[in-house]
Structure formats: C-alpha cells, structure tokens
Amino acid sequence: MNRYITGAVIKNLREKHGMTQARLAEKLCVSDKTISKWETGKGLPDISLLEPLAKALRVSLPELLSGEQIINANRSANMLKSKLYVCPICGNTLHSTGPSVISCCGVGLPPLEIEPEDDGHLMQCERLEDEYCVSLPHSMTKEHYISFVAYCTDGRFEIVKLYPEGDAKARFFIRGHGVLYWYCNRHGLFAKKV
C-alpha cells in the first residue's frame, strides 16, 4: 500500500459510530490528546496501532488505509468478471472474482490487462468431443514461456499451470461459452472467447 491513514478518515469513522475521542482513546490505550493529534494531522498512529484502530472503528485494514468502504456489490460472483494477478517476484498466479486489493511478496499487484493477440501468441483451440484442447506455438524456455492457461465460464474458473521446457498445451472439459486466458511471462495476458 502506498497510502497511509489520514486524520480525516479516523474522524469520519469515529463520528459515524458515535464515538468520542476519549472513548476511542480508551479502546486503544492512548490519550484523547493523541486521537486529537491524529485527527488534526499533527501526528500519525504508530503502525502497531493500525489493526486495533481498524477493529475499534469497525472496518478492515484496507478500508482504514484507503478511506473507502469496500462493499461486495457483486453478490452473484459471476466468474466472467474475474481479475488475474501475477507476482513479478515469485511468479505466483492469483485470481479474484472482482475488484480486490491483492499483494504478494510485499508488493501490491494491479490486475492484469488483456493484450491484443499477435502472431507470437496465437491460441489454437480444437474441440474434441467434450473437451477444448488448447495449444500455443510458443517458446517454453526458462526466460520466455507461457505461465498458465485458464478457462472461465460464468460459474467456473479453471487454471492449468505450465512450466518452462514443457509443452504449451492444456485440456478443459467444455462447460459452455466462456473465455480462454493465457499468460506470457514477457508479454502479458491474452484472451479469446470460446
């Protein structure tokens, strides 16, 4: 996270819950003058107080730090609204069914953006009975490879991890219309509707 809590956020959340500075101070074992300093911008809470402060103000730590309430408005969790993330340090692949705050190895990760297909990243998708057989004519060296292939429908998300010096192939049971994703460690995320 590249933001730190602001005094205005603390004050707004405290007042929203009808809490006095003295009551909040009591919950955190600090003085009411300390709360006043935070709210007027003359000081900041110690990092060790962030979790207790979030709990006292009845919000999550990301909400406290961003100053924005996080509401799950997507109750149906349509998998086609999935977001994909890849850690640039360890290569970990993460998936969410909507907007979220994701980090890995201490780094905040933005969702991957879909790149336009090009000659070096053309997906070949063949339908054999009840399966999609997908392959890519892509190099699979340790320096340049396809990291994963995924198949997403409105109710299911499947991912196949690929490894350098292996084949850039995967098979998926057909579960209706959806999207195929594949990720090149150098050129990014690509997608194709099926």
Image (cartoon, rainbow, N blue to C red):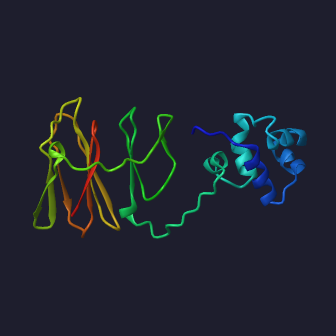
Residue 107 at x, y percent in the picture: 49, 36
Q: Residue at x 18, y 45 (%)?
A: 121
Q: Residue at x 20, y 66 (%)?
A: 174
**Left or right, residue 192 beside residue 119:** right
In the rendered view, tell whether residue 94 sits above or below residue 43: below
**Left or right, residue 30 beside residue 148:** right
Question: Quarter of the image holding residue 177?
Answer: bottom left
Residue 116 at x, y percent in the picture: 25, 50
Q: How many numbered dots are placed on residues in this image? A: 0
Residue 146 at x, y percent in the picture: 23, 41
**Left or right, residue 62 beside residue 77:** right
**166 or 179: nearer the viewer:** 179
In the rendered view, tell whether residue 154 sits above or below residue 83: below
Residue 59 at x, y percent in the picture: 68, 54
Question: Quarter of the image holding residue 166?
Answer: top left
Q: Residue at x 66, y 50 (%)?
A: 67
Where the C terminus falls, by quadrant?
A: bottom left
In the rendered view, tell whether residue 28 sits above or below residue 125: above
Q: Residue furthest top?
A: 143
**Left or right, residue 77 beside residue 186:** right
Q: Residue at x 63, y 48 (%)?
A: 66
Where the N terminus falls, by quadrant?
A: top right
